[in-house]
Image: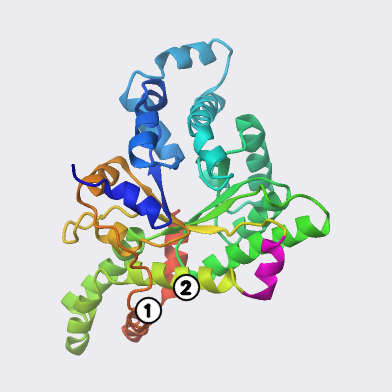
Amino acid sequence: MTANALKKLEELGQSVWYDYIRRDLYQGGELRRLIQEDGLSGMTSNPTIFQKAIAETGLYDDAIRRLSGRGLAAGPLFEALEVEDVRAAADVFRPVFERAGGDDGFVSIEVNPALSHDMSRTIDEARRLWQACDRPNVMVKIPGTSEGVPAIRACLAEGININITLLFSVARHRQVMEAYLSAMVHRAAAHQPADRIRSVASFFVSRVDTLVDRKLDTLASGGPEERRPRARALRGKIGIANARLAYEAFEQTFAGERWAALAAKGVRRQRPLWASTSTKDPAYPPLYYVEALVAPDSVDTMPPETYALYRKEGKPQVRIHDDLAGAREAFRELAALGIEASAVGDELEKEG
């Protein structure tokens, strides 16, 4: 029997979460099967995934009629369906959460993306979703925008598990790690427990290449002649280089005396979570990003197609530290071509 590559990732210290949620997954036993056979240890969701599940199936029709009968408008009704799914999925993952000592088994629910630049309303929404879900193994997703960072710190300081989403740059990743540590210091100083709070920093990968490759293609086809080979050579390299440098920042942040003092109080690391790891460009192998970013003490959230393919064809090996010098050189080359990493991050953050 062929070894299950997903189980091997678990052995290497990388958790696999499912970037999908739909009612029949937990009602029909499929989710339990994935947990038992593959070691699946979490789930992420977003409004787009929910909208697709509702629009393309009849799975929610009875619940919609039930909630409509209570007089709920479209927005509150959609959220009620979302909360029902997240609570139910969290219950299925609860044994994983318990076995992992609270380190895994999480299901994420996202605040309204329209609030990503409104700190106060983001905090209010995160509190409300946290209370509505009422499960210790739920994470509330907050975008890592400049306005989101203080909201993230405030929610963590209150004891809410947070999945920071839409991270595209190492600089922003450092900011959200600092927000996490600051919140844990605050709780420790206030004699509040910090050992039960968990957080992940969702770093997006393929979306970086999608944008950068488009800019490189423009240079390769119409830029100065001497720049064209360099532009072509950088295609598909920046997303992985960016993630590897983000992991290096993670290792640097969660080390040293400051971290040791917090760890002694039971504080856990804020793990990096690799998001957007399915390939968007058919020129790249379908497991291009997943294979390159196997890393201990990290999470990879995979959509169903990537998940199924990795189970069959994955070649698990820790590669996160491969060619860090090359990763730094790729960014120097990018800047020499007139493409600034900070501008790329800002553009992607604005896209949401």
Q: Nearer the viewer, residue 148 or 313?
A: 313
Q: Is residue 295 above or below residue 216?
A: above
Return the x and y of residue 33 as percentages of the image width and height: 35, 30
Q: Is residue 316 visible?
A: yes
Q: Is residue 5 left or right of residue 101?
A: left
Look at the image and tell me whether residue 22 can be seen. no
Please say if 160 is above or below 209.
Answer: above
Quadrant of res 274? bottom left
Residue at figure coordinates x 67%, y 33% from the top left? 131
Specify whether residue 79 is painted magenta: no
Q: Is residue 16 left or right of residue 287?
A: right
Q: Image point 39% across, 51% down: which residue?
A: 10
Residue 248's label in the rendered image is 2
Residue range corresponding to the magenta coloring: 256-264
- Give the image location of residue 134, x and y in percent: 64, 31
Indicate whether residue 263 is drawn in magenta.
Answer: yes
Callout 2 amino acid: Glu
Q: Main secondary structure of the magenta part?
A: helix
Residue 347 position within the rendered picture, expressed as x and y whole percent measured from the top left: 43, 64
- Tell me, for residue 324, which label it has, or none: 1
**How crowded is the residue under tag 1: few (<14 C-alpha within 10 Å), some, or many (20+)?**
some
Q: Answer whether labels 2 and 1 touch (C-beta < 8 Å).
A: yes
Residue at x 52%, y 34% (from the top left corner)? 95
Q: Is residue 237 above or below residue 189?
A: below
User: Image quadrant for the N terminus?
Assistant: top left
Local crowd size for mark 2, using a 10 Å CA cut-off: few (<14), some (14–19), many (≥20): some
**What is the x, y in percent for residue 59?**
37, 19
- Residue that sits furthest to the bottom in the current view: 226
Q: Amino acid at mark 1?
A: Leu
Q: Residue furthest toward the right?
A: 190
